[in-house]
Amino acid sequence: MTGMVLRRLNVSTPFMATFERLTKRVTRVALHCFGSGEPSVRVQSILLLRAMAVTLPPPALERIAKGVYRTFASNAKFVNADSVEHIAFMSTCVVEIFGLDHAQSYPLAFTYIRQLASLLRGALTAKSKEAFRNVYCWQYVNCLECWERVLSAHAKEESSALRPLVYPLAQVALGAARLLPSARYAPLRLRLVTLLNRLGASTGRFIPIAPLLMELLTFSELTKPPLSVKSHPPDFTLVLRLAKQDLRIPGVQDVIVESTMEALAEHLHQNAYSPAFPELAHIPTRELKKFTKTITVTRFRKAARAVIEAAERTSDWVIRKRDAVDFAPKDLAKVENFLREEKAENKAPISRLTKTLHEKAAQRVAAQQATEVTMTRNKKGSTGASDSEDDENVDDDDDDD
């Protein structure tokens, strides 16, 4: 019944223009249904809200954009296997609403990204458990990912009004990833690195994520003997923090190293067609070589050497191409077109490795999800819930690495 009413209201949207109080009441009801209704009701509610934002005069769009984002944020506080799809749908709706009018969306997006920056600054200043919890929680991470999706969708062009927000969002995400340099927060850091990789790929901006990944490989837990346990590693998409004993599980160590190599390869792939690639890849390659000398696990050395080899081959390839050109670095238009055809065909060696690593990661995630479904069916009383904010408290020993 609610879905039918919302659908009929959608048709009547143009007639609301002269009834301000009615418009506000309908907006409140639609936002409530958007946040708490059944899937079909949520779809009808966002369709109604979008129609109102497009059809009605100001400040309808501003009011609806604020409401949709705030409703998303209030529903993004906790993540488990059941809520992931709902949060992803709401995030998609935020992307849609904020893409209707970039000029009107800019001040709102700026305000909300600044709120995230203020929470991060507070954590860096106060250095208290409560301040850290304000950043290292699902709501903060989901909001960062939401804004990454907004900018990835609507800030691709230099002329976009939202384009100036790419840099501050990247700075906030980089700062959040560095806030607590602990191996226990490897899932959160990898999640933020993936976010930054997507943002860099969609906007064409260079984002220095390599130091974040190299630091993951220096944590002492990777060099400690693994524990012989039968438990499966936690799903990194459903947790932000690992328990201390989880860091000694071979499966967890595998996920950390493999995900790090995949993210680094993706980062190098994004910049593989730049004349500056040899210089960009030098430090990560050097650090990976150090890693292969200190790590005792054969499969980790093999994974690192694969990235090293692909990066070095790509560097040699770019140097040969670079030596053959007749323009200087100041010729920006020609630099922009450097290796454009090769990029379209993914000819760089690091690009081929990145594709292979993405395929392996997809297979790993699919296998883990299949295992979790089987375990959930066989386990009585399983709720499938992941860490709540109370479970993710920042302990005093988080910086013991």
Image: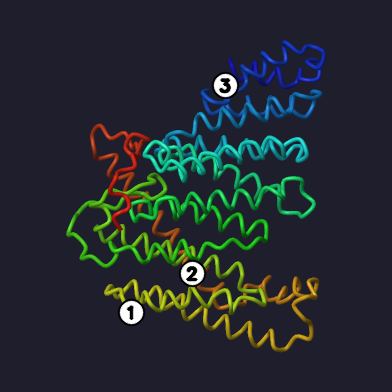
Image side of residue 126 versus residue 14, left or right? left
- CA gap between label 3 and label 1 equals 57 Å
Q: Mark 3 points at which residue?
A: 33
**Residue 23 image-quadrant placement:** top right
Please, what secondary structure does the residue beneath circle 3 have?
A: helix
Image side of residue 154 versus residue 361, left or right? right
**Observer-nearest of 247 and 7:** 247
99 w.r.t. 212: above or below: above
- Give percent across and percent down for residue 72: 55, 32
Q: How crowded is mark 3: few (under 14 residues within 10 Å), some or many (20 or more)?
A: many
Q: Give the quarter of the figure containing the N terminus.
A: top right
Q: Which amino acid does label 1 sit on?
A: Lys
Task: Single out the mark in the foreground, 2 or 1.
Answer: 1
Q: Mark 2 points at which residue?
A: 356
Q: Which of marks 2 and 1 is nearer the N terminus?
A: 1
Q: Which residue is drawn at 75% across and 37% down?
A: 100
Task: Single out the mark in the foreground, 3 or 1.
Answer: 1
Residue 293, which numbered label? Answer: 1
Please, what secondary structure does the residue beneath circle 2 have?
A: helix
Q: What residue type is labelled 3?
A: Cys
- CA gap between label 3 and label 2 equals 42 Å
Residue furthest to the front: 125
185 w.r.t. 41: above or below: below
- Give percent across and percent down for residue 338: 73, 76
